[in-house]
Image: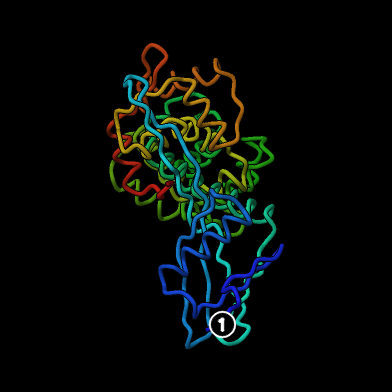
């Protein structure tokens, strides 16, 4: 039997002899070594090893604690949040069932974790935006930022021979042409030469015989769902995820606790904004946002404490990502 250690760790790589371990102990040993090099917050999500193909890889994640205690319950509850799929490390075979992992720098691994965490939050915010759009659409900041798009939809629906210059002259908005292009890409408009006509998605809404208010809400809701990322990131309509972020500063704890009637304090919401979104927000400003969301039945707010709305909880939970 070999007297060599089956594991060797240097500053940026480690070697392992897979012949020395069964499947379970191999995973444990790799996790132990990676934790030694990086952090005890790291966990091994999966190991793929095929000796016939000389293949070994490991997918890792990061874990951290979050307090998900109910502010109206004396019992403290700590949840270990697991953010998976942070990085997959593929080892290089070096012969005789020996493999070498070249380890990324700690800063690079942390950046990969941040990207994964941000992606999950983006997906959660989109799920929230879809669920609460018809409610927050009543709030002036949302309507004001979407007003140019609302105008274009209504004008094109009403007029048969509008041109792009007609709409630009009416709006005096430097983004008008970008909005028209986005609405065409999403199937709400047809642009033929210089003419702008309503597209199949507006036609589809028209067939429902909706009132003007209902039509506007229906079409704008479809635009938000279909074009959320485009409108928010490419066109800068940040109000689309403004209220979802403040809503999720509450709901992220409720989902992790799996408790739709979880009570949190404003301080808990502030802490979630800092921990999850890296946002330092003033208490009074956050309380104003919570009051706005309570006014349209996204949250409940009572004596400085926040609780979720059961319908919103159920709707978002149906397609929200696993967030630990």
Q: Position of residue 101 (x, y in %)?
A: 62, 71
Hey, which residue is sitting farthest top in the picture? 303
Vertical order, 184 against 172 (above or below): below
Give whichever of 55, 174 is nearer the camera: 55
Please report the residue visible at 56 percent of the width from the left and 32 percent of the height from the top.
Answer: 145
Vertical order, 68 against 81 (above or below): above
Q: Position of residue 17 (x, y in %)?
A: 55, 77
Q: Position of residue 186 (x, y in %)?
A: 49, 54
Q: Is residue 32 left or right of residue 312?
A: right
What is the tally of numbered marks visible in this picture? 1
Give whichever of 231, 44 is nearer the camera: 44
Vertical order, 206 against 38 (above or below): above
Display coloring: rainbow
Give whichever of 44, 284 is nearer the camera: 44
**Badge 1 density bin: few <14, some 14–19, many ≥20, Cα 10 Å:** few
Please report the residue visible at 39 percent of the width from the left and 35 percent of the height from the top.
Answer: 132
Q: Quadrant of residue 9?
A: bottom right
Q: Quadrant of residue 69?
A: top left
Please report the residue visible at 41 percent of the width from the left and 46 percent of the height from the top.
Answer: 222
Vertical order, 46 against 216 (above or below): below
Q: Which secondary structure, mark 1?
A: loop
Q: Is residue 50 left or right of residue 94?
A: left
Q: Is residue 131 left or right of residue 7?
A: left
Give the residue pinned by disc 1.
2
Q: Position of residue 209 (x, y in %)?
A: 28, 41
Hey, which residue is sitting farthest right in the picture? 11
């Amino acid at each position: 039997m070999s007297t060599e250690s089956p594991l060797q760790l240097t500053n940026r790589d480690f070697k392992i002899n897979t012949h020395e371990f069964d499947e379970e102990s191999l995973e444990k040993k790799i996790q132990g070594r990676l934790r030694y090099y990086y952090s005890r917050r790291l966990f091994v999500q999966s190991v793929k090893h095929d000796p016939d193909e000389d293949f070994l890889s490991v997918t890792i994640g990061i874990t951290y604690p979050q307090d998900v205690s109910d502010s109206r319950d004396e019992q403290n509850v700590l949840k270990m949040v697991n953010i998976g799929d942070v990085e997959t490390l593929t080892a290089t075979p070096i012969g005789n069932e020996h493999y070498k992992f070249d380890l990324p720098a700690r800063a690079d691994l942390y950046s990969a974790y941040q990207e994964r965490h941000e992606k999950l939050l983006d997906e959660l915010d989109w799920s929230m935006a879809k669920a609460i759009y018809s409610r927050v659409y009543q709030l002036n900041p949302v309507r004001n930022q979407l007003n140019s798009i609302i105008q274009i939809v209504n004008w094109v629906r009403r007029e048969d021979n509008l041109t792009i210059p007609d709409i630009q002259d009416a709006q005096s908005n430097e983004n008008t042409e970008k909005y028209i292009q986005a609405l065409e890409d999403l199937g709400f408009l047809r642009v033929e030469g210089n003419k702008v006509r309503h597209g199949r998605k507006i036609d589809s809404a028209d067939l429902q015989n909706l009132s003007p208010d209902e039509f506007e809400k229906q079409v704008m809701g479809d635009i938000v769902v279909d074009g959320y990322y485009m409108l928010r990131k490419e066109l800068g309509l940040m109000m689309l995820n403004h209220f979802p972020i403040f809503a999720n500063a509450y709901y992220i704890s409720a989902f992790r606790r799996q408790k739709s009637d979880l009570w949190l304090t404003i301080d808990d919401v502030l802490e979630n904004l800092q921990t999850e979104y890296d946002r330092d927000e003033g208490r009074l400003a956050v309380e104003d946002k919570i009051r706005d969301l309570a006014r349209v039945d996204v949250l409940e707010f009572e004596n400085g404490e926040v609780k979720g709305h059961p319908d919103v909880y159920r709707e978002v939970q149906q397609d929200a990502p696993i967030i630990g």
